[in-house]
Amino acid sequence: MKIRTVTKADVINEISDKTGIDKADVQVTVEAFFSVVKNSMAEGENIYVRGFGSFVNKKRAKKIARNISKNTAIVIDEHYVPSFKPSKIFTEKIKSSKSLK
């Protein structure tokens, strides 16, 4: 089974085809959505989209790591990483998908 990769351009084309909205307008909207997500998360805000999922910042604890090429220890301070948690509806749709079986 080969899984197809969908690009942002593919998403824009599909939205344009399904809604009849001009591709340029869809592109501006999609870019604005991603910009809002990035900027909000950079400010420490989480985003919840009912029926789709949550974009959240996860805190990583301070830890000591090894640089194996120099055989030294380095300290990685605590930091945040972006994460996506799909909603229950989203997860169930993927689990019941026939194309993934």
Image (cartoon, rainbow, N blue to C red):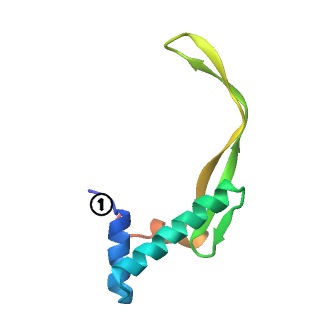
Identify the residue at the far left of this view.
Answer: 2
The answer to whether residue 64 is left or right of residue 24 is: right
What SS does tag 1 mark? loop
What residue did someone put label 1 on? 4
Residue 59 location (% of width, % of height): 71, 45
Residue drawn at (32%, 59%) of the image: 5
Q: Quadrant of residue 71?
A: top right
Residue 68 location (% of width, % of height): 52, 15
- For label 1, count other residues whose C-alpha is less than 10 Å away and answer few (under 14), some (14-19) or many (20+): few
Does the rendering let one see residue 32? yes
Image quadrant occupied by the C terminus = bottom left
Above or below, 7 relative to 67: below
Q: In this orientation, which residue lies closer to the viewer: 98 or 51?
A: 51
The answer to whether residue 31 is left or right of residue 47 is: left
Above or below, 23 relative to 73: below
Residue drawn at (71%, 31%) of the image: 77
Residue 84 location (% of width, % of height): 58, 58
Image quadrant occupied by the N terminus = bottom left
Does the rendering let one see residue 86? no
Residue type, label 1: Arg
